[in-house]
Image (cartoon, rainbow, N blue to C red):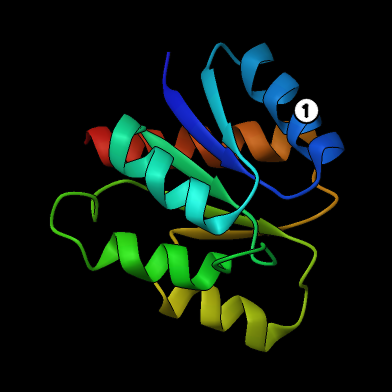
Amino acid sequence: MARILAVDDSPTILEMIKAILESGGHDVITAVDGAAALESARAESPDLILLDVMLPKLDGYRVCRLLKFDQNYKSIPIIMLTAKTEEQAMATGIRTGANQYLTKPVEPDTLLTAVATELDKAQG
């Protein structure tokens, strides 16, 4: 069972993501803005982070960049999960350090597969 930080500013989407991840046997912690995401990531050291791009306080790109350029957190896989579907947005996500970039709405199986893939890579 992995500990996953899910970050989204929509409580409805956050609950949906949490339910999907918990159905896959994961322990889920949540944050609703970029500043809280950064604080939770540093306090909890999750096994993986699911990160929205459009967030209050700090956007997902900035959160990703800050974590990926920090020696203590750079190995945590980050999957961006966002409504931003433009190619440039995807390229920016990968360039800032995201391991994967998924767009909403996402099928539960697609999300769980992406999470399993990144957790497997991180372990090994």
At x 67%, y 39%, the residue is 111
Quadrant of residue 87 within the rendered picture: bottom right
Specify the amino acid type for callout 1. Glu
- Residue 112 against residue 122 in the figure, above or below: above
Could you say which is closer to the camera, residue 47 or residue 113? 47
Q: Secondary structure at mark 1?
A: helix
Q: Which residue is more in the foreground, 36 or 13? A: 36
- In this view, 24 is above or below 62: above
Q: Residue at x 65, y 88 (%)?
A: 88
Quadrant assignment for the N terminus: top left
Report how many numbered discs are placed on residues in the image. Answer: 1
Residue 93 left/right relative to 121? right
Q: Nearer the viewer, residue 91 or 65?
A: 65
Q: Residue furthest left?
A: 71
Residue 45 visible: no
User: Where is residue 38 drawn, in percent x and y?
Assistant: 41, 51
Residue 56 at what x, y percent from top left? 66, 63
Would you name the residue on which mark 1 appears? 15
**Do we see residue 37 in this rendering?**
yes
For image coordinates 72% across by 60% down, the residue present is: 82
